[in-house]
Amino acid sequence: MARLLLLGLATMLGLGPGVGLAGDLSPREIYESSSPAVVLIMGYSHSGQRGSGGTGSIIQQDGFVLTNAHVVIEDHTGQPYPRLTIYLKPDRVTGDRKVDLSRSGKARVVAFSEPLDLALLKLDGLPGPFPVLELDDSDKAEIGDRVVAIGHPEQGGLWTLTTGTISAEFENFNDTKGKSVFQTETGLNRGNSGGPLLDTDGRMIGVNTAIARVAPDGLPITSISFSLKSNVAKQWLRDQGVSAREALVRSDTPRQDKSADRSLPLPRGQTTQPGNFLAAPRIASPPLPPELPPELTAQTVPSPRPYNLDSLISERNRAEADLEDMIKEMRGKLGGR
């Protein structure tokens, strides 16, 4: 009611409906306070031939990360990717991925739900405490409220900020019981999956989950994206016993939650998931940029290119393979003495 009175007063003063209310943070302020808790996630097979990428939010200082299940679960096995890497945001994003992706650690899946498209990860190998994003009460958000998303959209930059408003609400989205979502026109693309939808206080009210790209007749769809409401995520986390940290840390086998009814498929191409860049159909998405030939060195490239998750996975896999070979060689030399 107080918010409505303030809006009415703003209108009477001729400020217009789009003016920010006192206490609302600007997109820049939201980004500065919230983006350090947003991470880049890569999951891939041992061979590096299959993989996925997306975004996540650190929700506990000891390194628990919330994201979408489809970011970290292999389609053909229904189980987590055997290799998971999480990258932390640098102090300043430069566009040079060697600089921007200099802080990383391995992760494991603690629990996941494919019906709700949620997964809980644990970041290992990096010292905490980590910055966190607070899960707010999504019931306080209404259609017309301004929102912000942070993520890593395919063909775009890392830790990208996009803005918009809540456009609609749905309960039991895609015929999945308990799956309540916001619709928003905030710019989302593959790579944003699992990232936060933030209110004007910089608190997370949704987990960015899906986008509509192409209608059944092939007509392109724009500005329709979906975010799972934070209250759904909070209830699911409580069901996983997140408050009982000791039980989570000791569990080596991810808990698969199948309690929600499985969703019924929409017409082909109508809704895709933005982070699963290999499994999601590429209808109406721009082609990947060509790989640079070996003779074209970094010195001859005029500016950094938008990152490419496929090449990131390939590079990461090669680096890990080289490290493993080096360790084996050192062990062999030590054993020969």
Image (tube, helix red, strand yellow):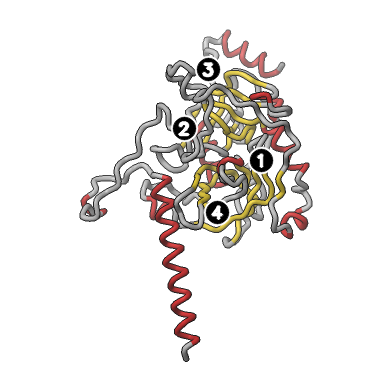
Determine the secondary structure under disc 2. Answer: loop
Marks 4/2: CA distance?
Answer: 23 Å
In the image, what residue type sits under mark 1?
Answer: Glu
According to the picture, the residue beneath numbered tag 1 turns out to be: 134
Q: Which residue is mark 4?
A: 84
Task: Return the disc, 1 or 3, that comes first in the chain's sequence.
Answer: 3
Q: Earlier in the sequence, mark 4 or mark 2?
A: 4
Q: Which three-letter amino acid code belongs to the residue tagged 3?
A: Gly
Between 159 and 208, the residue placed more toward the observer is 208
* Residue on which the image places disc 2: 281
Q: Mark 3 = which residue?
A: 18
Q: Residue pushed farthest bottom?
A: 337
Q: Amino acid at mark 4?
A: Leu
* Secondary element at image label 1: loop
Name the residue furthest top: 12
Q: Residues within 10 Å of mark 1 (few under 14, many from 20)?
A: some
At x 60%, y 42%, the residue is 67
Q: Quadrant of residue 114?
A: top right
Could you tell me which residue is drawn at 24 percent across and 46 percent down?
302
Task: Give the spatial CA distance, label 3 vs label 2.
Answer: 36 Å
- Select label 1 or label 4 by which is in front: 4
